[in-house]
Image: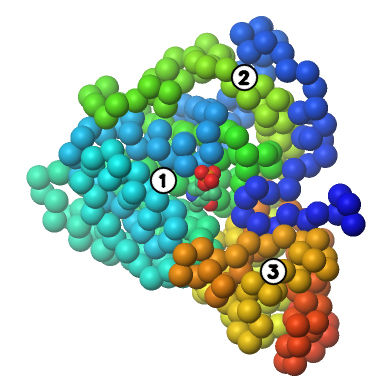
């Protein structure tokens, strides 16, 4: 059926009607005073969302662009970085670092398992010459639905004193608590198509005072992504280059909606959606890739047994117009992923679980008793 598309992937995520309508206006001049007022409001609210007094800068880029900016502005060629890699995104930050001639050491974990913070402690404690200039961590690893122990790893980075902590918070910002100032996170990157409830196209980088000090001496080449230019412009409620004006109309409204809900409530909602999804999936006899203690509350990765992940996705799409994500790299065909971050409600989770239940039955999974998935999910939501 036309216009009944339901997007349940970990980005792009659904967009509220109010935001869509806000974007359907004529663009205005990005150097106008009217637009400056919009930037001023957005900047203030972005600081609220990031729980910070640091600069939060907006780039016309996807999340990867935000992370690239967050890496190259604070480092010089040949410097050493320690990168956590337990999935597609952790792997990507290592690749960016190598592309820019940094010396990369990776701490890996099996896909589906969290990074081991002890390994970071040991590496950082052993670095008496303070060669490690940055530690790069993906907080919510979207490829596997695992949350990494950022708070603990960050404590070891703080004990090291010299290294910056650079965080991929692309699927945590707005969904999972990331108290940037309380924890003292130096660089935090995110992207509009995830928890922000707006379409793709904007990247965000939050930069601490310590990171700005590193910026002064960092010599990796930079131009479009030179964050100094964004800082200067943002302080004047402006932007260095033409920003996506209409996307920012949407962002203005999305941030107002987030403020109306409140941070605490947003995090609790994501927790409940996750718990309900997991309960429903388990009741259907499927296994989860991440365990209960280390699950991200933005995305749930499900292992398929018997019925293949790809046939589940195809049936969900064909019969119910629900789009869920597949696995990446070696997990392709082995898992499917349900995104439940941003503009997602309890009703959406019940819909997905009911459709999944029906899909499994259609595909001949004999173990499924009709109604068990929805019953288990409802029980969580009724509490
Ligand atoms: C989506 C995502 C990104 C950014 O991907 P883009 O396609 O560049 O927006 C980075 N990290 C994580 C964990 C993500 O989920």
Mark 2 vs mark 3, foreground winner is 3
Residue bearing mark 3? 313
Q: CA distance from mark 2 to mark 3?
A: 40 Å
Label placed on residue 196: none
Q: Secondary structure at mark 1?
A: strand
Which element type, helix, strand or loop, lies under badge 3? helix
126, above or below 33, in the image:
below
Q: Residue furthest right?
A: 1
Q: Which residue is mark 2?
A: 39
Q: Which residue is mark 1?
A: 167
Question: Quarter of the image holding residue 40?
Answer: top right
Indicate the quadrant containing the N terminus: top left, top right, bottom left or bottom right. bottom right
Vertical placement of residue 180 versus 321, above or below:
above
Q: Is residue 99 visible?
A: yes
Q: Is residue 267 something that shows in the picture?
A: no
Label 2 neighbourhood size at 10 Å, few (<14), some (14-19), many (20+)?
many
Q: Is 245 rendered above or below residue 356?
A: above
Picture quadrant where residue 324 is located: bottom right
Which residue is depicted at the point 72% across and 60% down? 323
Q: Position of residue 223 (x, y in %)?
A: 38, 22
Separation of disc 1 and disc 2 at Cα?
24 Å
């Amino acid at each position: 059926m036309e216009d009944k598309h339901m997007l349940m992937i970990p980005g792009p995520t659904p967009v509220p009607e109010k935001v869509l309508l806000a974007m359907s206006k004529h663009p205005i001049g990005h150097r106008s005073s009217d637009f400056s007022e919009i930037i001023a409001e957005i900047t203030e609210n972005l600081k609220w969302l990031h729980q910070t007094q640091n600069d939060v800068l907006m780039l016309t880029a996807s999340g990867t662009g935000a992370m690239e900016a967050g890496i190259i502005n604070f480092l010089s060629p040949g410097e050493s970085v320690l990168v956590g890699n337990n999935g597609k995104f952790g792997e990507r930050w290592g690749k960016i670092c190598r592309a820019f001639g940094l010396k990369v050491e990776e701490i890996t974990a099996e896909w589906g398992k969290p990074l081991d913070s002890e390994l970071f402690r040991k590496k950082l404690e052993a670095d008496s010459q303070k060669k490690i200039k940055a530690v790069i961590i993906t907080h919510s690893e979207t490829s596997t639905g695992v949350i990494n122990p950022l708070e603990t790893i960050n404590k070891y980075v703080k004990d090291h004193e010299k290294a910056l902590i650079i965080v991929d918070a692309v699927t945590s910002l707005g969904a999972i608590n990331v108290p940037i100032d309380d924890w003292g996170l130096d660089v935090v990157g995110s992207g509009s198509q995830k928890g922000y409830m707006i379409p793709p196209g904007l990247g965000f980088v939050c930069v601490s005072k310590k990171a700005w000090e590193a910026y002064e001496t960092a010599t990796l080449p930079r131009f479009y992504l030179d964050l100094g230019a964004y800082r200067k412009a943002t302080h004047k409620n402006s932007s260095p280059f033409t920003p996506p004006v209409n996307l920012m109309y949407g962002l203005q409204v999305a941030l107002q909606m987030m403020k109306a809900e409140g941070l605490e409530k947003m995090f609790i909602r994501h927790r409940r959606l996750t718990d309900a999804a997991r309960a429903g999936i388990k009741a259907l006899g499927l296994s989860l890739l991440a365990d209960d203690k280390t699950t991200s509350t933005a995305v749930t990765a499900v292992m398929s047994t018997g019925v293949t992940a790809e046939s589940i996705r195809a049936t969900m799409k064909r019969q119910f117009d629900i789009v869920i994500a597949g696995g990446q790299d070696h997990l392709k065909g082995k898992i499917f992923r349900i995104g439940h971050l941003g503009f997602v409600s309890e009703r959406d989770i019940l819909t997905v679980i009911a459709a999944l239940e029906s899909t499994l039955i259609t595909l001949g999974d004999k173990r499924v008793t009709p109604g068990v998935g929805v019953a288990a999910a409802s029980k969580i939501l009724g509490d």
